Amino acid sequence: MEEQTVVLIVGAGPAGLATAACLTQLSIPYVIVEREDCSASLWRNRAYDRLKLHLAKEFCELPHMSYPADAPTYIPKDQFVQYIDNYIERFDIRPKYQTAIESCSYDEVRKCWFSMVRDMKTSVVVRYTAKFLVVASGENSAENIPVITGLHHFAGEAIHSSRYKSGASYSGKNVLVVGCGNSGMEISYDLASHGANTSIVIRSPVHVVIKEIIRLGMTSVQHIPVNVVDGLLVRLSNFVFGDLSKHGIVRPKLGPLLLKAKTGQSAVIDVGTISLIKNGTIKVLGNISKIEGNTVEFEGRKKSTFDAIVFATGYKSTANTWLKNGESMLNDDGLPKQEFPNHWKGANGLYCAGLAKRGLAGIAMDAKNIASDILSSYHA
């Protein structure tokens, strides 16, 4: 079977949906395919129960639709999923679910993208031809778990944070969280709150702030130079938390907003974890050297036994597993070669949305840019 469309969007997470909505506003035809059986599967199926959007709602809107007036400033997971459902209905987006892209390449002769797409329910393969291709399969497409000697033989439970829901089932158990981003810090808090004996591996420098500080920073930086704002955020955070280096938490040299801009690394927004680290409820540990049975050895030969390990070590892009001829836009890790804000466009009608580590605000920018650019050549 062969089908034709103007734009093929791969992925029905927030990035793919935002792009679809922007194309709809410009009356540009598209097809959107999604390997899972629902939209925004990361939010529906792979997020822990207590998750809220870490940024204020004004920084987390998709294009052309605001949150309801009575929505809280920090949107809980379930309300965000409802927002996604309303968004799909508003723009009449009809993703082809359980439809996996297997390969995609550019045809220089016919000047279009050829994609082989499999219906996972029937195993029927359809060949799509599209003038434009949007990679919206996400930074968070596949779990990233570090290689650790002995991990495969760990006697307890080892899971990625995408499979963690609640600390309720870990009460009284010794649990190690690996990773000190927002997920790792919040999962540690959740575990300790449910009575687990919780430890966290903090391997690298990290900014810790409270949500009000980061909201102030993101608002101020629209009017004040980023280095000035960063200086203020660090001083405010030091005032709130004091010197955290004695607890194993060191600040990066770059300020929080500049670090996000240059590397994509977000500041950790504290939900109560720091006070539990300070009072010893949550223990901070260094790098893991190896695992033997249920014993984990850390750098410096310190050893502890654990019933479970939760890897809050992020995700990786899988775009390069199916996309051929994508080298104009993506590097070997399946992420943009160009730095923000010039990352979203490749050659021959190739685009990416949501791969710049800029959250929902970055997704909205990408979607608008992509739709406008397609419009300019679609009618050319």
Image: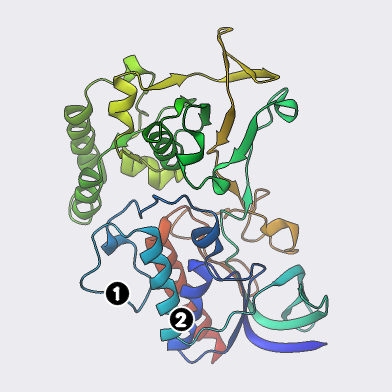
> Residue 80: horizontal and vertical position, in percent?
38, 65
For marks 1 and 2, the one nearer the N-term is: 2
Q: Which residue is drawn at 31% across and 38% down?
A: 270
Q: Which of 182 and 162 is in front in this view?
A: 162
- Which quadrant: the C terminus? bottom right
Q: Name the residue under label 2.
A: 21
- Amino acid residing under circle 1: Ser
- Amino acid residing under circle 2: Ala
| Residue reaching furthest to the top | 301
Q: Bin the neighbour count of mark 1 within 10 Å (Cα to Cα): few under 14, some 14-19, many 20 and up.
A: some
Q: Nearer the viewer, residue 134 or 71?
A: 71
Q: Residue at x 56, y 88 (%)?
A: 378
Q: Which residue is drawn at 48% across and 19% down?
A: 285
Circles 1, 2 touching at the beta carbon (< 8 Å) = no
> Residue 135: horizontal and vertical position, in percent?
61, 67
| Local secondary structure at mark 2 | helix
Alpha carbon distance from label 1 to label 2? 13 Å
Q: In this view, does 278 lie to the left or right of 342?
A: left
Q: Is residue 80 left or right of residue 218?
A: right
Q: Mark 1 points at which residue?
A: 66
| Local secondary structure at mark 1 | loop
Q: Bin the neighbour count of mark 2 within 10 Å (Cα to Cα): few under 14, some 14-19, many 20 and up.
A: many
- Which quadrant: the N terminus? bottom right
In the rendered picture of this protein, how many numbered marks are placed on residues? 2
